[in-house]
Image (cartoon, grey):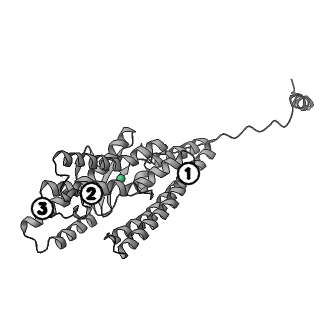
Amino acid sequence: MSCAPLLANSPIAAARTRLRYTRIRTCVLGPFRYPRMPFAFEVGRLFGIRIRVHALFLAMVALFWLTQSSGEGAIGRLTLLAYLGLLFVFVLIHELGHAVMARRFGVQVIDITLWPLGGMARLSRVPETPHIELLIAAAGPVVNIVLTGLLLAVAALGNVLASTEILDPGRWFAMTDLGVGSVLAFSIGVNLIMGTFNLLPAFPLDGGRVLRALLGARLDFVAATVWAVRLGRVVAILVLVAATATDLLGITELPLLGFFLVAVFVHVAGAQEELQVRIRAEREKEAETLTTPRPAAPPRFSREEYQKLVDRLPGEEP
Ligand SMILES: [Zn+2]
C-alpha cells in the first residue's frame, strides 16, 4: 500500500483518505522513530532480518583492539579478537530475543544495528498494547539472564565454578586466554551485565519500555510515555552520579564515559520518542474529528408549521 493520499472529491472521502494516510504513517512509526542510521553497513541476514554494523561501532572495536593488544603477540591479538567476536554474538542474541517475541505478535523487525551503545532492533510499528510492549521489551534482557543461568549451570557441572575466574568480577574481562574457565567467566559477566543494565527503568532502554507498559495499564499511551521519559531521566542521572561517586571513592573502576553517553542517549532519545508519540496522538485525534459525522441539525419547523407554510404558497396553475 502506498502512503500517498488518494485523490478524493468529497470532503468526507478526503477525510477518510486522511485517516487512512495517518494510519499507514502510524504503522511504520518504527523507522520514523529511529531512522535508519547512516554509515551502517549490512553484514548479513539472520532469520530474514538484516544485520547492520555501524561504522562508529567498528571504529570503537578496532581502537579497543589496537590499544589493548599492543605489545601482545599474534596469539594475544587473535584471542582478544575472539572475545570481541563473542561479545558481538551476545549482543546479537539479545536483539534476536526482542525480534522473536515481536514476530509472535505480528510486529516485523526491519533490521538490527550494532552501534557504540549496543544493539538496536527497529520494529515495523510501536506496540501500544501494554502487555505486548512489556513482553517484547523484556525478551532481550531475559535471554541474557537465562544464558547467565545456563552458563553458571555448565560451570557448576564442569566443576569450574570453584575457580576464582568465574566468581570474581575483576577477572570477567581479563580476556587473556581462551581456556574454558576464562571464556565462561567472560560470557557470564557479559550476559549478567547486559541483562541487568538493560532492565534499568531508563526509557528508552528495555527496562524503561517495561515501565511504560506497566504505567500504560493505568494511563493512556501519551501520559505513560511522558512519565516513563521523566523517570528514565532521573534514573540515568542517579546511575551516573552513583558510578562517578564510587569511582572517585576508589570503590569501583567503571567506564564513566560509557555511563555519561548512556545518560545523554536516555535524554535525547527519550525526548525524541515522546515528541513522536505526541505528534501521532494529535494526528489521530485530528483524523477522528474529521471523520466523525456531525449530528443532524434539529428541524427549524414542526411538521404542522411546515404544512401551514406550504399551504400558504400560491397553488400551481393547472
Ligand atoms: Zn534490548
Q: How far is the residue under mark 3 from the one under mark 2?
A: 16 Å
Position above or below: 229 against 264: above
Q: Secondary structure at mark 1?
A: helix
Say which quarter of the image contains residue 177. Answer: bottom left
Pinpoint residue 82: horizontal percent, then vertical percent: 15, 59
Which residue is at a point 58% across and 47% down the rendered structure image? 287
| Residue sitting farthest toward the left | 74
Report x, y in % for residue 62: 20, 68
Instruction: Using the numbered discs, state the Cα–Cα distance from disc 2 to disc 1 in whole angstroms.
Output: 39 Å
Which residue is painted at 22% across and 66% down in the image?
Answer: 61
Q: Which mark is residue 177?
A: 3
Residue type at mark 2 is Val
The residue that disc 2 covers is 190
Number of residues whose C-alpha sits closer than 10 Å to that of mark 2, classed few (under 14), some (14–19) or many (20 or more): some
Residue kind at label 3, given as amino acid type: Asp
The mark nearer the N terminus, 2 or 1, is: 2
**Whole-number angstrom distance, CA of label 3 to CA of label 1:** 54 Å
Q: Position of residue 98 (x, y in %)?
A: 35, 47
